Image: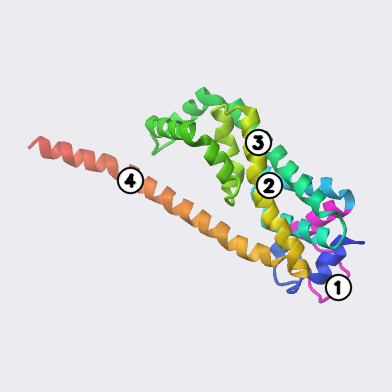
Amino acid sequence: MHLVTLAAASSPDSGSRSGSGVVSGSGSAEPTTGIAGWAAGLVEALGGPGAGLAVALENLFPPLPSEIILPLTGFAAGQGAISLASALFWTTLGSVVGAAALYGIGRAIGRDRMYALWARLPLVKVSDLQRTEAWFQRHGTKAVLLGRMVPVFRSLVSVPAGVERMRLPAFLALTALGSFVWNSVLVLAGYWLGDQWDLVERYVGVLSKVVLGAALVAVVAYVVVRVREPRQKGRHRAGQGR
């Protein structure tokens, strides 16, 4: 069974979206290209470990979308290329491996180096980082667990966990649990949707855009507040000097 050919032939809107790597032609035997073709090729060549490798790389490089890789893996399970249990096991293991690598990067950066880098950034204060650190120390377990289920941030949350030196066994356990929930939703969606697996990408993609939009609004608001603070302090001092 050739999963790449199946993915190309079964997509209902072949050729309409280059992001999913579907080539033109209805029912064509041509393999897919782009991310979907790459992921399908890994699963076809390596089975479950190929799906795990794709997910591990997705964690390290967030532009690789899990909303394509995971449903496509579920579709592969539905077509008998791999078992459903294998799909869930290997994708969760891949998530943990990728997250552990980012945790290691955060741990290597360390708290002192993070403060030194932060102090050089414009529009931020060391007190901001101190508050963030205190928040993470209080809510780090929830941040790691729930963060694994939020698009985009599911990868980024591993870095502060490493910087704050969260206990590795706890980090791995929380990451595995959160990843299993997220992966199961998308893998099972692809499994049940069959040749319409790419619908998952459409809806999860909307959610990702909402999250990114909210984050962008928060960053803009933060910058505006930081820029206005010196002006307001200057006016306040000028008023006191009269």
Label 2 vs label 1, nearer the camera: 2
Residue furthest to the top in view is: 112
Asked whether 104 falls inside the magenta stretch, the response is no
Q: Which residue is mark 2?
A: 180
Q: Which residue is mark 1?
A: 28
Q: Earlier in the sequence, mark 4 or mark 1?
A: 1
When asked about the image quadrant of residue 174, the answer is top right
Q: Coloring scheme of the render?
A: rainbow
- Residue 137 position, x and y percent, is 48, 31
Give the CA distance from mark 3 to mark 4: 38 Å
Q: Which residue is mark 4?
A: 225
Q: Amino acid at mark 2?
A: Phe
Residues tagged 4 and 1 counted as in contact (Cβ below 8 A): no
Find the magenta span and give its range: 24-44
Residue beneath the point at 56% across and 45% down: 146
Give the CA distance from mark 2 to mark 1: 34 Å
Question: In the picture, which quadrant includes the C terminus?
Answer: top left
Dot 3, how many residues are within 10 Å of its Cα: few (below 14), some (14-19), or many (20+)? some
Q: Is residue 31 left or right of residue 233?
A: right
Q: Identify the secondary structure beneath mark 4.
A: helix
- Residue 235 position, x and y percent, is 18, 42
Dot 1, how many residues are within 10 Å of its Cα: few (below 14), some (14-19), or many (20+)? some
Given residues 226 and 44, the one toward you in this image is: 44
Q: Amino acid at mark 3?
A: Ala
Residue beneath the point at 22% across and 38% down: 233
Q: Earlier in the sequence, mark 2 or mark 1?
A: 1
User: Which label belongs to residue 173?
Assistant: 3
Picture mark count: 4
Q: Amino acid at mark 1?
A: Ser
Q: Is residue 187 above or below residue 235?
A: below
